[in-house]
Image: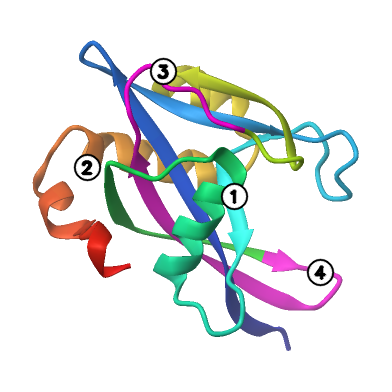
Amino acid sequence: MPSIRCQIIEVGIFSFQESQPLYLLLRRSPDDTLYPLTWQIVTGKIEKGETAAFASLRELKEETGYVPERYWVVPHINSFLNVSEDIVEMTAMFLAQVPSGSMPVLSSEHIDARWCPLDEAKKLLVWPGQIQAIELIHHYIVRGLQAALLTELPLHAQ
């Protein structure tokens, strides 16, 4: 029977161009052993002793250079079966708003970045959980509904 583990975080990133939200997608390196050249949101592991929120901010900074202007925990958990280890992986989801017109400073894990409207982001993403997350982020947080007020994290507390 598979066990369950939560050691992965994901961070959606958005910014406004005029009044339209754009989402940042990163393209994995061709040298990556897992899913080379696929488009994704920031994804990383929680290190020993870290909280999920701290790990998400660290991974955001490492993979893009960004420190967010605003930050949310997203009421969505991705899950997938890691067949090689027989573990169901649960991934905690976060959302970062970054300055308009800015470009990320990519780590060696990625070779490209693209700011996309929602429909384009959904077409580029591979994993159903990330597509569902970006839709949820768009409709309930980015558009400023009550979920945005209830899930925003104070940045100084991280």
Distance from Cα at disc 3 to Cα at disc 4: 33 Å
Which mark sits nearer the N-terminus, 2 or 1? 1
Q: Nearer the viewer, residue 92 or 156?
A: 156
Residue at horizontal 20 percent and vertical 58 percent from the top: 151
Residue at horizontal 80 percent and vertical 43 percent from the top: 35
> Mark 1, residues whose alpha carbon is within 10 Å: few (<14), some, or many (≥20)?
some
Label 3 SS: loop
Q: Please give the label number shown on residue 12.
A: none
Instruction: Give left or right: position of 142 versus 91.
Output: left
| Count of numbered tags | 4
Which mark's residue is nearer the viewer, 3 or 4? 3
Mark 4: which amino acid?
A: Val
Which mark sits nearer the N-terminus, 4 or 1? 1
Mark 3: which amino acid?
A: Pro
Which mark sits nearer the N-terminus, 3 or 1? 1
Residue at horizontal 29 percent and vertical 50 percent from the top: 71
Distance from Cα at disc 2 to Cα at disc 4: 33 Å
Mark 2: which amino acid?
A: Tyr
Instruction: Give left or right: position of 57 versus 40.
Output: left
Q: In what quadrant of the picture does the C terminus appear?
A: bottom left
Which mark sits nearer the N-terminus, 3 or 4? 4
Distance from Cα at disc 2 to Cα at disc 1: 27 Å
Q: Nearer the viewer, residue 57 or 135?
A: 57
Residue 73 x/y as whole percent: 32, 59
Residue at label 3?
117
Q: Nearer the viewer, residue 150 or 59?
A: 59
Mark 1: which amino acid?
A: Glu
Q: Please give the label number shown on residue 140.
A: 2
Q: Which residue sits furthest top?
A: 18
Give the magenta-colored segment's residue range: 81-105
Residue at label 1?
62
